[in-house]
């Protein structure tokens, strides 16, 4: 049976999670997204599944962030075709071989908006704590709530701009919603003093 690409839907959540769990650390971003939203095009974006002989070998999130998962170079041309000439994402994240291959495929085949980049990180180490922390937790750090939205948004925009080199609003106004969702999901922790994170 040849290799195929198909859209994944809610019924494919279990097999997508099984694939992602094979490389937990590098797929943590997408694992967390699927845990929060499932495979839902309206909240997450499209998810393309690359199959060989009917077995899911790789997948690619096609939303505000593009994220290829599964170290399968043969999937790259399929993902390039699925993503197409119209760029809808702000970033491509994931294992370097797949993300760089995807970027090269998109920027070579479609040019235009896919060539507009701010930075390319050929290496971005992932850090994992494999035992208990060596330091006591700082008691000032707490879960942030919707009441912390304004200072958390300001800190998030500053951090994003400093790290990426451009404003998160460059691609539209959706960053406020993203920050608000982090607060509502309980994914934001911080130390707030005098109304500032």
Image (tube, rainbow, N blue to C red):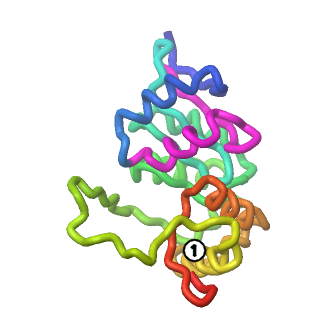
Q: Camera-side residue: 51 or 17?
A: 17
Q: Is residue 16 left or right of residue 106?
A: left
Find residue 18 and report its horizontal and vertical position in percent. Answer: 43, 27
Image point 58% across, 72% down: which residue? 118
The quadrant of the picture occupied by the C terminus is bottom right
The x, y position of residue 130, in whole percent, is: 23, 53
For mark 1, does the 10 Å Cα neighbourhood hold few (<14), some (14 to 19), or many (20 or more) residues? few
Q: Secondary structure at mark 1?
A: helix
Residue 114 showing in the rendered view: no
Residue lying at the far bottom in this picture: please name it: 194
Q: Quadrant of residue 121?
A: bottom left
* Residue 124 forms part of the magenta stretch: no
Q: What is the magenta range?
A: 26-51
Counting from the top left corner in percent of width and height, residue 167 is at 66, 76
- In the figure, is residue 182 to the left or right of 136? right
Q: Is residue 76 left or right of residue 83?
A: left
Residue 64 locus on image (x, y percent)? 67, 53
Instruction: Check the image and report above or below for 14 versus 44.
Output: above
Location of residue 38 by image quarter: top right
The residue sitting at 72% across, 44% down in the picture is: 43
Which residue occupies the foreground of this view, 69 or 137? 137
Relative to 25, is 153 on the left or the right?
right
Q: What residue sits right under mark 1 in the picture?
A: 160
Residue placed farthest to the top in the image?
1
């Amino acid at each position: 049976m040849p290799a195929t690409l198909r859209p994944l839907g809610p019924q494919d959540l279990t097999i997508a999670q099984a694939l992602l769990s094979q490389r937990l650390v590098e797929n943590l971003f997408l694992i967390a997204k699927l845990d929060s939203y499932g495979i839902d095009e309206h909240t997450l974006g499209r998810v393309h599944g690359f199959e060989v002989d009917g077995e899911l070998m790789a997948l690619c999130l096609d939303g505000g962030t593009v994220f290829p998962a599964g170290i399968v170079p043969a999937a790259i041309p399929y993902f390039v075709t699925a993503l197409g000439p119209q760029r809808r994402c702000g970033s491509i994240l994931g294992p370097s071989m797949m993300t760089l291959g995807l970027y090269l495929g998109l920027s070579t085949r479609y040019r235009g908006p896919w060539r507009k980049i701010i930075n390319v990180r050929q290496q971005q180490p992932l850090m994992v704590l494999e035992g208990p922390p060596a330091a006591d937790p700082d008691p000032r750090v707490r879960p942030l709530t919707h009441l912390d939205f304004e200072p958390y948004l300001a800190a998030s925009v500053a951090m994003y701009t400093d790290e990426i080199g451009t404003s998160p609003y460059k691609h539209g106004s959706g960053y406020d919603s993203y920050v608000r969702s982090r607060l509502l999901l309980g994914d934001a922790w911080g130390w707030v003093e005098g109304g500032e994170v």
